[in-house]
């Protein structure tokens, strides 16, 4: 589903270049639920952003769902095509949800459909029901708990029916009980066939999933 080979990424810090990823190779199969585990600064967010086509690597190859996205560090798609590709195949979830404060839960979930020019309120409702949020359709983010906000964000990430879900520390701001509810939801989605990559430094999460990939100082550990 995703093949990444020799991915590198450098950040410029003043005059110095800092290597955040030092040649990461990773093969993710359809239906995998991978926990990307590593300490703060390991490069987890950097790698997820590259796998999610939100950022470009300095070098390496990236193939997603048969599409060559990057070859030898060169992007293979135009901005517009990459945008469309990402929307179709990849859902993304962030630690702090990134919900739009002025919109209701329902409107937040429907938002990506509006961007795609295909509004569909029923689809948004169905998804909110699937994450047990149908009783909060008209609440705004400030009127929701952290776990509820994350469930809205998950529904929004799934609205275009992606095959891959990338989650960056999705339970970082949640208490352990709420965290477990969200992880149960990920398990359920994975059992339905969704491929999931979840970045975290929470070892308890790593214990729950079968596939753990460890990242440290920009390198994968065996
Ligand atoms: N925009 C940037 N400019 C310069 N350096 C950056 C930038 N973004 C990240 N870095 C550096 O790259 C390294 C990897 O950062 P990254 O955010 O990928 O780590 P992470 O594993 O997600 O950490 P955390 O668990 O704290 O979220 C860190 O040393 C960080 O300081
Ligand atoms: Mg991070």
Image (cartoon, helix red, strand yellow):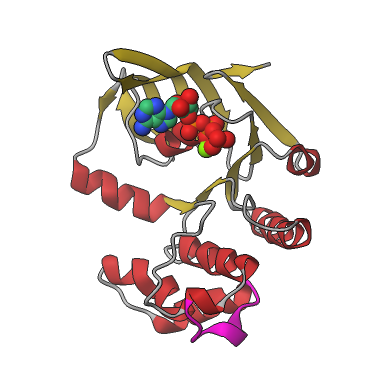
Q: Position of residue 24 (x, y in %)?
A: 50, 19
Residue under the point 64% across and 29% down: 38
Q: Is residue 197 above or below residue 148?
A: above
Q: Position of residue 91 (x, y in %)?
A: 46, 54
Q: Position of residue 90 (x, y in %)?
A: 44, 50
For the record, the magenta segment spans 131-140
Q: In which quarter of the view is residue 52 placed?
A: top left
Q: Is residue 96 above or below residue 215?
A: below
Q: Position of residue 185 (x, y in %)?
A: 68, 61
Query: Which residue is situated farthest in the front direction here?
Result: 14
Residue 139 colored in magenta in the image: yes
| Residue 33 at least partly seen | yes
Residue 39 placement, left or right of 85? right
Q: Is residue 53 above or below residue 157?
A: above
Magenta: main secondary structure: loop
Residue under the point 54% across and 79% down: 143
Residue 220 colored in magenta in the image: no
């Amino acid at each position: 589903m995703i093949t990444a080979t020799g991915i590198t990424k450098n950040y410029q810090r003043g005059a110095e270049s800092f290597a955040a990823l030092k040649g990461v190779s990773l093969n993710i199969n359809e239906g995998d639920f991978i926990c990307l585990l590593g300490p703060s600064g390991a490069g987890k967010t950097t790698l997820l952003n590259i796998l999610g086509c939100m950022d470009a690597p300095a070098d390496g190859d990236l193939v997603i769902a048969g599409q060559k996205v990057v070859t030898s560090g060169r992007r293979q798609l135009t901005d517009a095509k990459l945008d469309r590709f990402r929307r179709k195949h990849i859902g993304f979830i962030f630690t702090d949800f990134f919900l739009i404060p002025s919109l209701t839960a329902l409107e937040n979930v429907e938002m990506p459909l509006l961007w795609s020019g295909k509004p569909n309120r029923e689809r948004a409702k169905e998804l909110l029901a699937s994450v047990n949020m149908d009783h909060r359709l008209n609440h705004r983010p400030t009127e929701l708990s952290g776990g509820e906000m994350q469930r809205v964000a998950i529904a929004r990430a799934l609205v275009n029916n992606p095959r891959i879900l990338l989650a960056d520390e999705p339970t970082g701001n949640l208490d352990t009980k709420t965290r477990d509810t969200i992880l149960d939801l990920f398990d359920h989605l994975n059992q339905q066939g969704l491929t999931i990559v979840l970045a975290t430094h929470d070892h308890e999460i790593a214990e729950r999933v079968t596939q753990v990939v460890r990242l440290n100082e920009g390198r994968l550990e065996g």
